[in-house]
Amino acid sequence: MVVRQRIAIDMDEVTADALSRHLELYNREFNMTLTVEHLQGKKITEAVIPDHRERVEAYPREVGFFKNLPVMPHSQEVIQALMQRYDVYITTAAMEYPTSFTDKFEWLRDHFPFIPWTNIVFCGDKSIIAADYLLDDTVRHFKQFRGEGIIFTAPHNINEQGYRRVHNWLEVRELFLA
Amino acid sequence: MVVRQRIAIDMDEVTADALSRHLELYNREFNMTLTVEHLQGKKITEAVIPDHRERVEAYPREVGFFKNLPVMPHSQEVIQALMQRYDVYITTAAMEYPTSFTDKFEWLRDHFPFIPWTNIVFCGDKSIIAADYLLDDTVRHFKQFRGEGIIFTAPHNINEQGYRRVHNWLEVRELFLA
């Protein structure tokens, strides 16, 4: 019997583009023109004017923030291809934003209907995930993870070292299916 | 450095008494007098009149089903004691009932405020959980679990064999803290 390896995949900044929503809300509220180019090596909360930080941190706690987020390019087709060879789970730290539960679940049902509900996980600390690989933009989750953490490039993590890195979903396909 | 062992704990029929809600709704709607005594070795959906089954299966999908569920006796004090010696996670198959997310999260915050959000997991298939022990009433979750599954006795599981069993929270304390 061949045991399939298991890949755990994050949502925000990996399958879902939450950063563009974050920028859009910030620029609209404060009449700013912050772009991804200003965020190299920084989270949005570190890039904004300190007086705006508290407000910007609150956006993801608002109902609707996670609704209709753009899908990361090629993530759907590559995940479908991965599922032919691997057990794929979506593992998102949703517990940080309890108002996101329904939006996140519906977003997955709308955009990744081929992922069964059995393979969706809302958690906090991802060291609880039993998988061979964790594809994530947040390296903090790799520290106590028992498998291999793989960085999915996002503006805030470009300077992180010590893990294999993919820059986009075409590179994910190359890494796991070449 | 001492590595703490990790215990994953289910909600329904382990920390939360969902069965009493289920019986209450069924008896009220169909004017029946079904009790726990009728459920030995059976799930409620297997014990009711076949014509009622579909309706009874639908109860947990209704908003509010998981609200204000009774807390299982001694679960709060024993979990607090376990947390002194173990890393404790709450792992519930909430994905089966997406309407339950908010009720379950709020219930935990109300009755187990000492469990941080980082240690709460909503999942489907529990083989994704990385823990040393899984305390659960549903043995199906033990099949591919990489740690040890421990049965928490519920009416439907009294005939299950092949795993260590605890009948109540005082026995959980005895097992892990004696």
Image: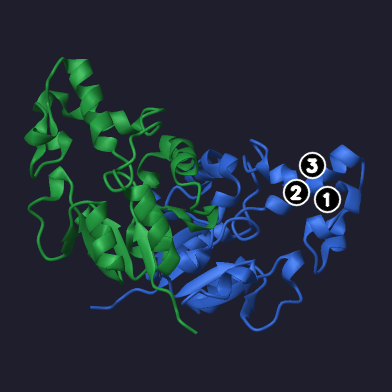
Chain colours: A blue, B green
How many labels, in total?
3
Query: Is residue B103 positioned above or below B84 on the image?
Result: above
Q: Earlier in the sequence, mark 3 or mark 2?
A: 3
Position in image of residue A2 (x %, y %): 28, 78
The disc at residue A99 is none
Question: To which chain does the residue with label 2 belong?
Answer: A
Q: Provide the secondary structure element on which disc 1 rests.
A: helix
Q: CA distance from mark 3 to mark 1?
A: 13 Å
Seen at 30% across and 62% down, the residue is B134
Q: Which chain does tag 1 point to?
A: A
- Both on one chain, marks 2 and 1? yes
Q: Subunit of mark 3?
A: A
Q: Residues within 10 Å of mark 2 (few under 14, many from 20)?
A: few
* Sequence-first disc among 3 and 1: 3
Point out residue A139 in the picture as x, y percentages from the top left corner: 63, 71
Between B160 and B84, the residue placed more toward the observer is B84
Assess disc 3: are there few (<14), some (14-19) or many (≥20) residues with their C-alpha within 10 Å of its C-alpha. Answer: some
Residue A53: image tag: 1
The location of residue A66, given as percent across then percent down, is: 63, 43
Front one among B90 and B3: B3
Distance (Cα) linking label 3 and label 2: 11 Å
Q: Are marks 2 and 1 in contact (CB under 8 Å)?
A: yes
Q: Return the residue at label 2.
A: A57
Q: Mark 3 or 2, which is nearer the eye?
A: 2
Q: CA distance from mark 2 to mark 1?
A: 6 Å
Q: Amino acid at mark 3?
A: Leu
Marks 3 and 1 in Cβ contact (< 8 Å): no
Q: Residue at x 50, y 74 (%)?
A: A145
Q: Residue at x 36, y 30 (%)?
A: B65
The secondary structure type at the circle numbered 3 is helix
Q: Which residue is mark 3?
A: A25
